[in-house]
Image (tube, rainbow, N blue to C red):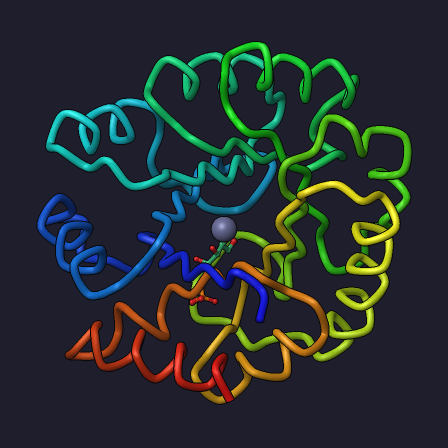
């Protein structure tokens, strides 16, 4: 069985008590904190930035923080998130003029680097930078908001991405983001994902542990 990781998106958490929310979701069995950064320019919404990432570290969060940058341009934010203590930094290829350089910037900063593919973005952006990737993130909704429905065509795209990663022989995580629930997580895993972002499916339930356990039970089937 692959080493599955569950990455709750704090976009759907209660921002008025964010530290507590992150503590609760981690003690409920989450592996990674998915941190959605939106700039009201690349995507039509505005969320949180490096100061909040740093605040979570100061609060005592030691789990990996997966900063998903939906910002344009990306390089300044990459630098800020390196300093703020991010573990993974991922960005959308459309948002960088020099994809290879941005990936290198992340790695030089000691973080793990990833590319994010919108539903209609072709996967070939990864072809010549495989050696600089620690993560490939496929969006299964259009970025900007939590609580949207999973776009079914992403399953085929996942299978293709899985093949490319396996052929490379590299340890690159394949993450899926958008509309992931207890009901569809298993078929998403079967299509090749090993890292699952879930925002509303976890934070809009009363008991995070029950939900995360139910997701893991599906993955173990
Ligand atoms: C959307 C974000 C997602 C979002 C997922 O742009 O990248 O991480 O929060 O939310 P759900 O799981 O509710 O679809
Ligand atoms: Zn995200």
- Tell me which residue sits at (74%, 70%) in the image: 154
Expressed as whole percent of the image width and height from the top left, the position of residue 138 reads 67, 56
Judge whether 105 appears above or below 40 on screen: above
State which quarter of the image contains the N terminus.
Answer: bottom right
Q: Nearer the viewer, residue 48 or 161?
A: 161
Q: Nearer the viewer, residue 30 or 197?
A: 30
Judge whether 150 appears above or below 43 on screen: below
Expressed as whole percent of the image width and height from the top left, the position of residue 47 reads 36, 41
Q: Nearer the viewer, residue 123 or 15?
A: 123
Expressed as whole percent of the image width and height from the top left, the position of residue 60 reads 13, 33
Q: Residue furthest front?
A: 1
* Horizontal side, residue 19 vs residue 200: left or right: left
What is the quadrant of residue 80 in the picture? Answer: top left
- Tell me which residue sits at (63%, 42%) in the image: 135
* Horizontal side, residue 138 vs residue 148: left or right: right
Q: Give the mark count.
A: 0
- Tell me which residue sits at (58%, 10%) in the image: 108
Expressed as whole percent of the image width and height from the top left, the position of residue 85 reads 34, 22
* Horizontal side, residue 18 vs residue 92: left or right: left
* Horizontal side, residue 98 vs residue 133: left or right: right
Judge whether 221 appears above or below 109 on screen: below
- Tell me which residue sits at (89%, 38%) in the image: 127
């Amino acid at each position: 069985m692959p080493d599955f990781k569950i990455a709750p998106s704090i976009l759907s958490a209660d921002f008025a008590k964010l530290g507590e929310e992150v503590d609760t979701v981690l003690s409920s069995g989450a592996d990674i904190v998915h941190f959605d950064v939106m700039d009201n320019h690349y995507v039509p919404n505005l969320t949180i930035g490096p100061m909040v990432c740093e605040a979570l570290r100061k609060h005592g969060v030691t789990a990996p923080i997966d900063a998903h940058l939906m910002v344009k341009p990306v390089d300044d934010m990459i630098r800020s998130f390196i300093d703020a203590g991010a573990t993974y930094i991922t960005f959308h290829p459309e948002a960088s003029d020099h994809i290879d350089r941005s990936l290198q910037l992340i790695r030089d900063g000691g973080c793990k680097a990833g590319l994010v593919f919108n539903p209609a973005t072709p996967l070939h952006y990864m072809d010549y930078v495989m050696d600089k990737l620690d993560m490939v993130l496929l969006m299964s909704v259009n970025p900007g908001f939590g609580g949207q429905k999973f776009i079914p065509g992403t399953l085929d795209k996942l299978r293709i991405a899985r093949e490319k990663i396996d052929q490379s022989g590299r340890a690159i995580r394949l993450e899926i983001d958008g509309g992931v629930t207890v009901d569809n997580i298993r078929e998403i895993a079967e299509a090749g994902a090993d890292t699952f972002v879930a925002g509303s499916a976890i934070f809009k339930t009363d008991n995070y542990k029950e939900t995360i356990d139910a997701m893991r039970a599906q993955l173990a089937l």
